[in-house]
Image (cartoon, rainbow, N blue to C red):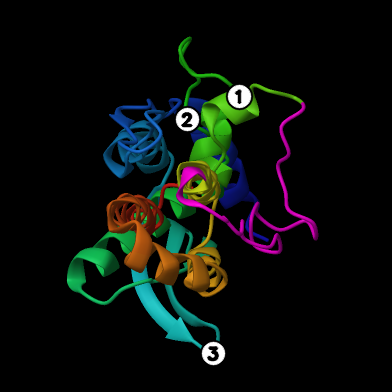
Amino acid sequence: MDTNAVHDLANAQMAMKVPRKDAVNPFHKNKYATLNSCMAAIKPALNQNNFAIVQCGGKDEFGHYVETKFVHTSGKEFVSKIYLELEKAGMQAIGSAITYAKRYGLLGLSGMEPDENPDDDDANKATVLHGGHNKEAATPSAPRHGTNGQAPGLNEPPLNPHNLNQWDLWLEEQKHKLQHMTELWQLRKWEETSLAERQKLKAEKPSILAVLGTAFNQNRERLNNGVR
């Protein structure tokens, strides 16, 4: 191992600034650090200690990814690889996934985390990194996982309303589950398990189905934008 490269990386880490949370997640209203904020806090210290940052895409047997490299003038490289997961096609979705991968590749490789402002609580940290919700995270008794340790709602049978008075309660329960999902495959699983209820809604209460569809699309966009 190149000891000079390790020495310079240690010096760079000591000189790095803490990335500032400069944007707000429109769905959960928590703050997070954008890619620009992470670059501004990390890149100067690396450059001053003989490192260049290289971020490029690639594909292997596991799928598409973004690779982040800290390349030392000696030729030594420190590498992080973040794989992309897309729910929908289109350059906007791809661009969002790439930005997410760049941001977390940079943070992970540098060993840095965004600052915690006074108005940020543990729930906001969970929202950014793990898809938590501020009110739920602040309540110790609130369940965080489903029956098999998965995200809430994936193994739990959907509510079976017997009359229209229960649809509003069912809607709130489903919106709550959607907000707590942290991976796109969980949204796809939810589509399968809620199909019967959504078909009944189409015939009996289309207005509630429209609200549910909006909630689904918002959370899909949240995950496509890399906000967990």
96 sits left or right of 51 in the view: left
Q: At which x and y percent is residue 227? A: 42, 47
What residue appears at the point 37 percent right and 58 percent down from the top-left corner?
Answer: 220
The span shown in magenta is 141-165
Residue for badge 2: 114
What residue appears at the point 48 percent right and 45 percent down from the top-left corner?
Answer: 179
Three-letter amino acid code at the position of disc 3? Glu
**Does 153 appear in magenta?**
yes
What residue appears at the point 26 percent right and 77 percent down from the top-left corner?
Answer: 89
Residue for badge 3: 61
Residue for badge 1: 122
The Cα–Cα distance between marks 2 and 3, rounded to whole angstroms, is 32 Å
Residue that sits furthest to the bottom in the current view: 61
Three-letter amino acid code at the position of disc 1? Asp
Q: Nearer the viewer, mark 1 or mark 3?
A: 1
Residue that sits furthest to the left in the current view: 91
Mainly helix, strand or loop, the magenta region? Answer: loop
